[in-house]
Amino acid sequence: MRTVYLNGDYVPENEANVSIFDRGFLFADGVYEVTTVVDGKLIGFDGHIERLQRSLNELKINYKVNREELLTVHRELVARNNIDQGMIYLQMTRGNPGDRDFAFPPEDTPLTVVLFTQEKQIIGTSIETKGLKVVSVDDLRWGRRDIKTVQLLFPSLAKMEAKEKGADDAWLMQDGYVTEGTSNNAYIVKDGKIITRDLSNDILHGITRKSVLACAKLLQMEVEERPFTIEEAYAADEAFATSASGFTNPIVEIDGNKVGTGKPGPVGDRLRALYIAENMKAAI
């Protein structure tokens, strides 16, 4: 049985309880982060902590993140649950005001802070060699996708629509252009150039995205940050997605159309190898 962290205490998962009046439950009024663990070490921790603070600020949740305190909790959970490869989920909500009200509670209302681990093979998966199939789905999420909130119902619906169509995931569409995947940033490669949507409120500012683009620069690869159409994706030489738990995952089929050769491409493979090497050196 896993040990989880709840509001300052380490407890067995079956003893961790959150109030029915918590605003995370009633209004999806909260944010989260996911930090990957490989060889028992944390990947990209500081980037996740910085984005956590940004998300809290954007939702006007008055809380100053304590990096050292959260680092201690992450490491303690890795040790207590004996995690070699997997993820640590961190969720913070505006807390339990004791009643349901659309208006925010007083600022001194304690936040609800939850962290838990999840074992998952990160390196050496079949996806690396087989790739993923995606379908396009209209993007019906709210307009502030740059905030990493716990409001994930539509991505779940899109993921299920993809599975019903025999695919692995969905790429979301806005005005004919790809925004991102259900839980990842999206990329295509054409004539050696990497194309990915530029940062705005329309997409999550991915921590892995930032690191992978830095790797592309080290490899002297050309990157163009702009929206691309689904038709461009069909005609791409290769495609891939980035996320904390997937690093770079090749996309081999979109809406039934084979991408390039229908197999993982060399650009994505080189980026994945360098990303792992660079981030394992920096892991803590």
Image: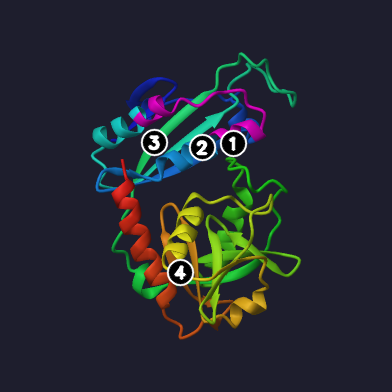
Q: Secondary structure at mark 3?
A: strand
Distance of mark 1 from mark 2, alpha carbons? Answer: 6 Å
Question: Disc 4 or 2, which lies upstream in sequence?
Answer: 2
Residue 99, percent from left and from top? 67, 18
| Residue contact between numbered discs 1 and 2, judged by CB atoms under 8 Å | yes
Q: Which residues are magenta?
A: 53-71
* Magenta highlight on residue 68: yes
> What amino acid type should be assigned to the residue bearing mark 1?
Arg
Return the disc, 3 or 1, that comes first in the chain's sequence: 1
Image: 124 above or below 133: above
3D distance between C-alphas at marks 1 and 4: 30 Å
Q: Earlier in the sequence, mark 3 or mark 4?
A: 3
Rendering quarter of residue 140:
bottom right
Dot placed on the residue nearer the N-terminal end, 1 or 4: 1
State the mark number for residue 50: 2
Mark in the foreground, 3 or 4: 4
Q: Residue at x 60, y 80 (%)?
A: 234
- 22 and 267: which is toward the camera: 267
Q: Classify 10 Å Cα crowding around label 2: few (below 14), some (14-19), many (20 and above).
A: few
- Residue located beneath label 3 in the image: 116
Q: Residue at x 37, y 31 (%)?
A: 71
State the residue position of label 4.
Answer: 220
State how far apart marks 3 and 2 are (Cα).
Answer: 19 Å
